[in-house]
Amino acid sequence: MYCDSIFFIQWQEHCQRKLNFSYNICESSIDFLVYKREAILLIQVRKRNGKTVDYDGKKIFEAIKKANADSKDKRMNNSTVWGFVSQIEEQFEDVKAPSVESIQDAVENILMKSDWQHTARSYIIYRSEHAKIRDTHKELMDKMMEITFSKGEDSDYKRSNANIQSDSVMGSMLLYGTTISNFFNDNYVIPKAYIEAHREGRIHIHDKDFSNLTYNCHQIDLQKVFKNGFSIGGSHIREPQSIRAAASLACIVLN
C-alpha cells in the first residue's frame, strides 16, 4: 500500500496511543512508504469452544479482503480494510474477552452500514457457509462417536444398513468408511442442489457413499426389459410371454 508519509506517521501514533498497535514503516522511495502491520496483542478473544486466545486483527483483515474479492464491489485498498478493522476494535475497547461471534456480528454490521454492500453480502454468505461446515463437522463427529460407543440395538444409525453387522469389528470399520465417504460426497463431490433435494426427500440417492466410485443398485426400467428383452453375456433374452416368466426375469435383472 502507498500513502503519504506525514499521514502515516500520525496514523502510527494514533494506533500506538489508542489501540496499542505498532507498525513497521520502511521507505521504498522518496515519495511513497510501504507499511506492514504488526499487532501487539491487546485483548483476548473467546472462541466457540470456550477457550480464550490472543486477539489477531489480521484475521478480520483477511476475512474482509476475501469477502471483497468475492463480491461485485471494486477492490478495497489496504487502508480501507484496516479502517474497518479499527472501527471494530474500538467497539471492544472495554470488553475483556469478546466472543468470536460478537466480533463477526460487528464486522457484518459495520460493512452493512457502509457503501460496500456487495462486500457485506459476500461476508454474510461466507460466514453462513462456514457455520454450515462447522455444523457438518460436528454431525460427522457425533456419528463417529455413535458408531464407536453405541450398541447396534440402541442406535438407529448403526441399524440403518441391514447389510452390515454393525457391532462387529469389520461392521464398525465399514460404518466408519461409509460415514466419512458420505461426508466427503456431500461436501465435495455431489452438487449442492442434489444434496439438498436428497435431504428434503425430493429425490433419493441410493448408496450415496459409493457415488465417488461407482453407481450401485441401478433403478432398471423393467417395462422396457419386458417389452424388448435384453442381451447379456452374448445371449439375447427375449421378452417374457407369461407372468411367471416375467417374475423370473425380474428376479434375474434385479438380483
Image: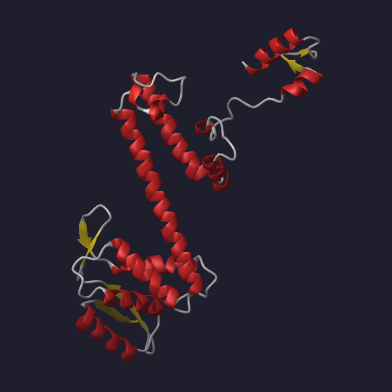
Residue at 46 percent across and 40 percent down: it is 184
Q: Is residue 208 left or right of residue 171?
A: right
> Relative to residue 30, is residue 175 depicted above or below?
above
The image's colouring method is secondary structure
Quarter of the C terminus within the rendering: top right
Residue extending farthest to the bottom is 6
- Residue 208 x %, y %: 52, 33
Q: How many marks are shown on the rendered structure?
A: 0
Q: Residue at x 44, y 26 (%)?
A: 160
Q: Is residue 238 or residue 203 the one in the foreground?
A: 203
**Relative image position of residue 75 (x, y in whole percent):** 49, 74
The image position of residue 190, as x and y in percent, is 55, 42
* Residue 175, picture quadrant: top left
Position of 14 with respect to 211 (left or right) is left
Indicate whether 34 appears above or below 204.
below
Determine whether 103 is above or below 205 in the image. Answer: below
Residue in the foreground of this view, choosing between 210 and 7? 210
Nearest to the observer: residue 200 or residue 248: 200
Residue beneath the point at 75% across and 23% down: 223
Relative horizontal placement of residue 54, taking residue 114 as reference (left or right) = left
Residue 25 lies, with reference to residue 249, above or below; the image says below
- Drawn side of residue 155 relative to residue 209, left or right: left
Residue 126: image location, x then y, percent: 44, 60
